[in-house]
Image (cartoon, rainbow, N blue to C red):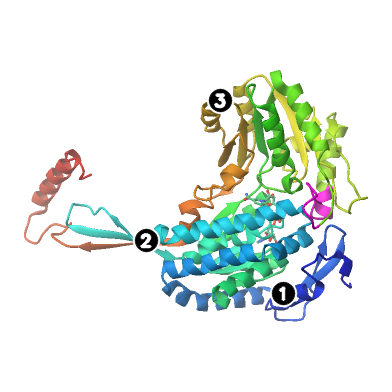
Amino acid sequence: MKPHADAFPARVGPDSLSALSGTVPAGDDRPGIEVEAPYSGAPIGEIPACSRADVDAAVERARDAQPSWADRSAAERAEVVSRFHDLVLDRRDELLDVIQLESAKARIDAFEEVADVASTARHYADRAPEYLASERRKGAFPLMTRTVEHRRPVGVVGVVSPWNYPLTLAVSDAIPALLAGNAVVLKPASETPFAALSIRDLLRTAGVPEAAFEVVTGTGSEAGGALVDAVDYVCFTGSTETGRAVARRAGENLVDCSLELGGKNPLLVLGDADLDAAATGAVRGCFANAGQLCLSMERLYVHRDVRDPFLDRFVRRTRALDLAAGYDWTPDVGSLVGSDQLEKVEAHVDDAVEKGADVVTGGRARPDIGPYFYEPTVLTGVTEEMALAREETFGPVVAVTAVDSADEAIERANDSEYGLNASVWTEDAERGRRLARRIDCGTVNVNDAYAAAWASTDAPMGGMKDSGLGRRHGRQGLLRYTESQTVAEQRAGSLHPPEGVPKGWYAKGMTLALRAMARLPGVR
Ligand code: NAD
């Protein structure tokens, strides 16, 4: 199909997109995959459907490029990433256009991606040399053994990313992988490949060797599966269902993986919360990116004493949201990404309504704005037999439930297969922090919905239970891409029985030494 020129924003046109997709090395002449602009449903371009052979070739090129990249010092690699940081901010408006074009999110949501990539790049450029430094470890006995732990890159890291944050989730996990001395091959979601291809170009301009960061496009089952089979580490972000399949393959290949998966995140409003702040925070927490955010709030538990005044404030703010298409900063909420997503959101709301839930606001699609727009929706009276009580909706839909105590709120928050992100609102911050530790989620925000924990790039982020394995961000977010290697030098004596000493005497001597060590402070 011919692309519709009027579907394009100011800085991106069909020619620039087709130039980007033309750089994906794909072998045979298979039909490409069409990409659409969800604002209008119009096609905007095509990307190659890479075959297993294409992916294998990209991984081989990356494997060849990796040793010389790893030979540079961590500080040199950090300089490259610092340049990348500056380029991302310099090219902000063009990146925002690409993200919006292929995902139809509001510009403010796209900006969160650009800001996140820049701050992740800055964090890891600053800290990578320290995270990667070799560390002295204690040997078995003081002075006898000199033991050092080194960190080596795993080799080629495969990143598989989803469509909801096409820039952030394509590159923010790749940055620490590159800084650790790995090459990266990325397979972005086929709905949103152009942000990934644009960012690849910025990495190369910053100085990452061409084959050290490759992008392969295509279907999840073929290109994604082939990538998982070919690399030395898999960093996957996506649904829990696909995550299980990826983990099975990684297990079969005996390579490590991190899995950032789905959520059904709870937000708790305690009886002493600042209700205006909680309502404002909940609106951002529920409807940022039209709810297509793994950290989004889909379950609100509100203390019964404040349920009505909170609901009133929350619904008023929700109704005031500007749901619109546009490449300016005015809209608050954009579109869903496509027809599958719209169908799922409609099915969840319709099922809940059929089974007795009340729609307080929203509850309908808005084809008058664009084919996949759906109104920010607040439901009450949601019960266990409704699909959206437990399943991730991944849309602008939230259920508000009254609870009688903080204990009940925590019990209900924890009653989920997921454990990604949670939020607690209270004027008593100390109590909020204490309660937060009882919630079974990898990140918990007090008096914020998700940004506080997410943007703390120095601290680990990831899911408990079915929300994932492993962590991104912080030291762990970089060291996952390394193999630790211990080099121990025996400088004096031996840990084995010395020649000519009877083994019984040796054992006696060792026993005395072990007892003495347990009693000497600082030796253990
Ligand atoms: P998805 O699982 O359908 O796809 C994610 C990626 O995996 C895509 O690139 C896809 O092509 C690829 N893929 C599909 N099948 C594959 C296979 N068999 N082998 C290898 N790769 C395969 O997810 P989605 O619909 O794109 O994204 C939405 C989901 O992602 C939601 O569940 C959301 O909660 C989750 N998510 C989680 C986080 C997090 O950090 N925890 C962040 C964003 C999104």
The residue that disc 3 covers is 428
Residue 444 found in image quarter: top right
Q: Secondary structure at mark 3?
A: loop
Q: CA distance from mark 1 to mark 2?
A: 37 Å
Circle 2 Cα neighbour tier, 10 Å, few/some/many (<14 / 14–19 / ≥20): few
User: Which percent across, then down, holds residue 208?
Assistant: 54, 73
Of 170 and 246, the residue lying toward us: 170
Of 308 and 463, the residue lying toward us: 308
510 to the left or right of 312: left
Sooner in the amino-acid sequence: mark 1 or mark 3 = 1
| Mark number displayed over residue 133 | 2
- Over which residues does the magenta segment extend? 327-343
Say which amino acid is labelled 2.
Ala
Sooner in the amino-acid sequence: mark 3 or mark 2 = 2
Q: Is mark 3 within 8 Å of ligand 1?
A: no
Tell me the residue at 60%/58% (across/down): 117
Tell me the residue at 54%/60% (across/down): 121
> Disc 1 or disc 3, which is closer to the eye?
3
218 to the left or right of 334: left
Tell me the residue at 70%/64% (across/down): 95
Say which amino acid is labelled 1.
Leu
Q: Which residue extends farthest left?
A: 500
Residue 143 showing in the rendered view? yes
Sooner in the amino-acid sequence: mark 1 or mark 2 = 1
